[in-house]
Image (cartoon, rainbow, N blue to C red):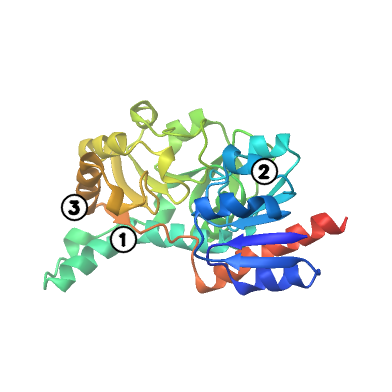
Amino acid sequence: MKILITETIHPTLEQQLSEQNWVCTHLPATTYEEVSQIIEEYDGLVVRSSIRVDSALLEKAVRLRFVGRVGSGMELIDTAFAQQRHIVCFNSPEGNRDSVAEHTIGMLLALLHNITKSHAEMQQGIWQRNLNAGTELMQHTLGIIGYGNMGSAVAQRLSSFGITLLGYDKYKVGFATPFLAEVDMATIFGRASIVSFHLPLNTETHHIVNRDFIDRFENDFYLVNTSRGGIVDTAALLDGLHSGKVKGACLDVFENEKPATFSALEQEQMDSLRKLPNVVLTPHLAGITQNSSFKIADVLAKKIIQHFAQ
């Protein structure tokens, strides 16, 4: 097979695929237009986060047998169209679930214990001890929405904190554990004081967190999103933060993650988020560690090899 590898990806993927006597071409700086011009020559395509594998590209991929996504989300790939053309799609969420879980909990602890707020004040020479007293995780009931690789990894690590854990997944059943109760959304709306999202972005989940969603919570609550920015309506979240219905937010992902392309409204929204002391922001790095870079590539390589070895 001839395989095109785009973007910067850990070399273990190319190494393992080449060991199968497959010919790999790695173009880390290539563009969609360049891929479109040469894709007809390849049996496999590996992308990360910059190349959109849409129907137009797939129509030109007359030899293509698989698309591999280094990472978890598949929103850049038209998986339905790929399936129509009998093109197998792979991803590797197992490779960065540990990183995402640790980052999620780190952000949540930073928010609840006012760590980032205190740090910013200390840098300005402000010593505010009592006013920055936080709350402990074990005081809370946390609802996990989406119980796949990421959600389950977060729950597993939180189980040692003594926190009450609730889990909801529209497409899974029977995942309750000794430390997590499997519930419906009504229960999360009624009981949760923290909600953490671990959902893919698609037409069903886009802006699932809107004003109506926020208003349905019986308790004021903290919101954590380390999945995809598009599941949260930023305007609705800001309304919730300003009203106090949303007590605080941890956001690693955003609706637009290219600041150079911000509209005036997007810039205003980001500025508002940055100014709020009860918001913790990171630039979509929950799944990025020195370890996960290798693991997501390694997992993907092994999935591809196993599939075509059958």
Disc number lying in front (3 or 1): 3
Q: What mark, if any, has residue 175 been given in the picture?
A: 2
Disc marking residue 104: none
Determine whether label 3 and label 1 are within 8 Å by CB: no
Q: Nearer the viewer, residue 34 or 244?
A: 34
In the displayed structure image, the side of residue 306 where residue 51 appears, left or right: left
Identify the residue at image location x=41%, y=62%. Answer: 106
Can you tell which mark lies on residue 275?
Answer: 3
Q: CA distance from mark 1 to mark 2?
A: 30 Å
SS for callout 2: loop
Instruction: Note whether 81 is above or below 34 in the view shown.
Output: above
127 and 234: which is toward the camera:
234
Location of mark 1 (residue): 113
Q: Amino acid at mark 1?
A: His
User: Do tag 3 and tag 2 residues touch (Cβ < 8 Å)?
Assistant: no
Kind of residue indicated by mark 3:
Lys
Q: Secondary structure at mark 1?
A: loop
Task: Assess disc 1: are there few (<14), some (14-19) or many (≥20) residues with their C-alpha within 10 Å of its C-alpha.
Answer: some
Residue 2 appears at what percent x and percent y? Answer: 73, 61
Q: Residue at x 25, y 52 (%)?
A: 278
Local packing at callout 2 (Cα closer than 10 Å; few below 14, some 14-19, many 20+) is some
Residue 304 lies, in percent from the top left, at 75, 58
Camera sees residue 5: yes
Tell me the residue at 12%/71% (across/down).
124
State how far apart marks 3 and 2 are (Cα). 39 Å
Q: Is residue 146 left or right of residue 256?
A: right
Query: Given contact means CB atoms under 8 Å apart, are the residues at marks 1 and 2 in contact?
Result: no
